[in-house]
Image (cartoon, rainbow, N blue to C red):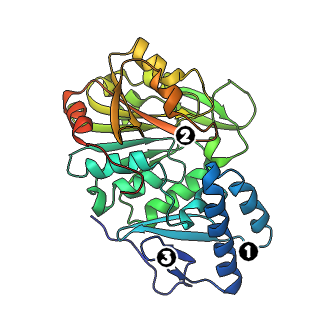
Amino acid sequence: MQPIVIDRGAKPALTFDRLTGGIAGAGARERLTIGAMQAGAAISSAWYFRGFAAGCRALSALSAEQPIEVRLNEDAIFSFPFCDGYWSLLLFSRYRYEFDIEMFFKGIADADYTLIDGGANFGYWSVLASSRPYGGHRSIAIEPSAANFAWLARNASRNGGRFTPVKAAIGATEGVAHLSGRKHEALSIAGGSEAGEKVPVITLDSLMEGMKLDPKGRYVAKLDVEGVEIAAIAGGEKLLSGDCVMICEEHGNDPNHTISRHILDHTPFKLFCYDPATGGFEQLSDVSPLDRIKRAVNYGYNVLATASPYWEQRIRALGPFSRER
């Protein structure tokens, strides 16, 4: 694996280390701003961080436009805009982004798999899954937005080019679509709008063919594709029916649990979800437990779906865990 590349002759980057809490390359104003964001995250954590993004927007008006790099572990650097309302939560060391998926990836670090990171945004999970503590896995990170893709490519480069960025949206068929939305973390091709950025659309199966992925290989397909998960599943029949586990986000503001209901009613996959009552991933035979599990409308929940005996065994073997572990 290639090491993280650091240009020793460049101006020191504004950097935050989640392992130590250390800040480097920051002046007094940047340190005060980081402290304000950390305090805002701590206060808003009781309400699933409602209001945090608005606070970041206010702070951004007082701060210079620049990137900040967060060291996620000893082999992972993640860059995003300073005062970004979504990713700046990483400056709060007690914050665990998608903690259930973090524990899943840690629990399968020894498995031989390729990550298909659909809707990768700036590449957070590709950065981590390809790092040594997570097993150093191959990752293909797919992101349609040109602005997001620039950050995705930056993060690939900053981590030694060890994962592959692909600029595209994922759908049921190949073609083109228009990307719309106000927040970089919630851009979508759903709705069929003719406004917005025009982007290419690929399918999971065409990605396999184009990247010459082994149909007998082992895969984790993470689909955070903002409302087109069902279409993405339809376009990935070959990939998903093989030795693959799929991760889909269940939006907290969807009381019908549309994605999970579709998986249970229209696919052969077994479905699992982290259950805080047991501290582990539990198999769902119907969607009713999600009424209890999905407690916040502004929060994303994840389900795992697979037809693979190998991945089913790995999910069941994870055992109970908690937010604090």
Q: Secondary structure at mark 2?
A: strand
How far apart, in angstroms, are the residues tagged by discs 1 and 2?
A: 31 Å
User: Can you see residue 173?
Assistant: no
Q: Secondary structure at mark 1?
A: loop
- Mark 1 is on which residue type? Ala
Label drawn at residue 321: none
Q: In the displayed structure, would residue 279 be above or below residue 37?
A: above
Image quadrant in which you'd find residue 272: top left
Label 2 neighbourhood size at 10 Å, few (<14), some (14-19), many (20+)? some
Label 3 neighbourhood size at 10 Å, few (<14), some (14-19), many (20+)? few
Residue drawn at x 33%, y 48% as measured from the top left? 321
- Mark count: 3
**Percent from the top left, x then y, of residue 135?**
26, 56
Q: Which residue is mark 3?
A: 21
- Mark 2 is on which residue type? Gly
Q: In terms of depth relative to the viewer, which is nearer, 240 or 73?
A: 73
Question: Which tag is nearer the camera, tag 1 or tag 2?
Answer: 2
Q: Earlier in the sequence, mark 3 or mark 2?
A: 3
Q: Are marks 1 and 2 in contact (CB under 8 Å)?
A: no
- Mark 3 is on which residue type? Gly
Q: In the displayed structure, would residue 202 be above or below residue 99?
A: above
Label 1 neighbourhood size at 10 Å, few (<14), some (14-19), many (20+)? few
Q: Which residue is mark 1?
A: 64
**Percent from the top left, x then y, of residue 111?**
21, 46
User: Can you see residue 312?
Assistant: yes
Q: Earlier in the sequence, mark 1 or mark 2?
A: 1
Horizontal arrangement in the rendering, residue 284 relative to residue 62 (left or right)? left
Q: In terms of depth relative to the viewer, which is nearer, 268 or 282?
A: 282
Q: In the displayed structure, would residue 15 be above or below residue 46?
A: below
- What residue occupies the far front of the structure in this picture? 277
